[in-house]
Image (tube, helix red, strand yellow):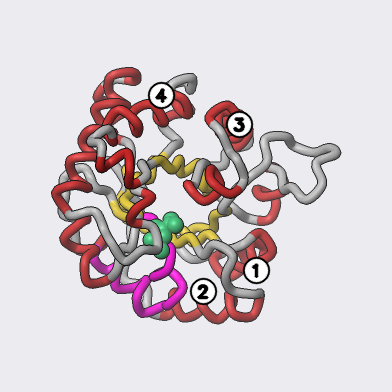
Amino acid sequence: MRKQIVAGNWKMNKNLSEGQALVADVLAGMPLLSENKIVVLAPAFLNIPETAKQLSGVAHVFCGAQNVHHEMNGAYTGEVSPTMLQAAGAEYVLIGHSERREYNGEHDALLVKKMNAALSVGLKPIFCCGEALEIRDANQQNDFVAAQIQAGLFHLSAADISQVAIAYEPIWAIGTGRTASAAQAQEMHAHIRATVASHFGSEIANEMSILYGGSCKPGNAAEIFAGADVDGGLIGGAALKADEFLGIVSAMVAK
Ligand code: PEP
């Protein structure tokens, strides 16, 4: 059965003590989760060991990272490797977030290396894709997103793709307060699932969690998550406030 997931991407926010407090507040109000309704918290690298410690023994809530390097060790100043993340307690990792594609020049070939490295140590990637506004305005979003998925994921084995979730995040909706409509989200998620099915088959595609990201809030989460192919969300801004994040988690649990 495919998992519903709400993942919080804290981005470059929350120092250690602020992060500790946020995790404690989130855990205090967490609704009942299950094996197929889970939560991931992805703080900055420095917070990962403490977040993982706070989550140890908590069922169905996992620690994630926002990025990973593609080598296990070596002369890569400032980088953090898959084995380091794993040792620190991360179980999930975002790969290909649009902010990293834009500000850090992360291109398809690099993302392939990151996917392979993360999967090789058992980290579960959340692969991010999504189009810029000019691509949507030109009505080319379907081809664009399918190309991102093909470039980033089609080389994987059946065993590896089964460990991957996809987050569809239209760039025009990230941090802008402008969300995709529920219909736009569902349409794209169905297209993403069909794209995965075209290469890996419908059984694998039907098992894959496809999350929506982009200005998701407690007030719009239930409507967006209601889409048959929308399996929860990747949450930025609203993940920084426990009550807002918990409102979104509740919408996922209620689906
Ligand atoms: C994100 O960057 O992953 C995101 C979805 O951000 P926001 O919720 O703030 O739009």
Q: What is the quadrant of the C terminus in the image? A: bottom left
Residue type for callout 2: Val
Residue type for callout 3: Leu
Q: Say what secondary structure mark 3 lies in.
A: helix
Q: Which residue is mark 1?
A: 50
Residue contact at pointers 2 and 1, CB within 8 angstroms: yes
Please provide percent x and percent y for residue 193: 26, 32
Image position of 29 (left or right of 50): left
- Gap in angstroms between the C-alphas marked 1 and 4: 36 Å
- Gap in angstroms between the C-alphas marked 2 and 4: 35 Å
Q: State the residue in front, 57 or 106.
A: 106
Q: State the residue in front, 249 or 179.
A: 179
Q: Going from the N terminus, do you reach mark 3 or mark 1 first?
A: 1
Q: Going from the N terminus, do you reach mark 2 or mark 3 first?
A: 2
- Gap in angstroms between the C-alphas marked 2 and 1: 10 Å
Q: Is mark 2 within 8 Å of ligand 1?
A: no
Residue type for callout 1: Glu
Q: Say what secondary structure mark 4 lies in.
A: helix
Q: Which residue is mark 4?
A: 150
Residue contact at pointers 3 and 1, CB within 8 angstroms: no
Within-10-Å neighbours for mark 1: few <14, some 14–19, many 20+:
some
Tell me if residue 219 can be seen.
yes
Q: Is residue 244 magenta?
A: yes
Residue type for callout 4: Gln
What's the residue at 53%, 59% (across, down)? 42
Identify the magenta region. 234-251
User: Which mark is drawn over residue 23?
Assistant: 2
Image position of 244 (left or right of 76): left
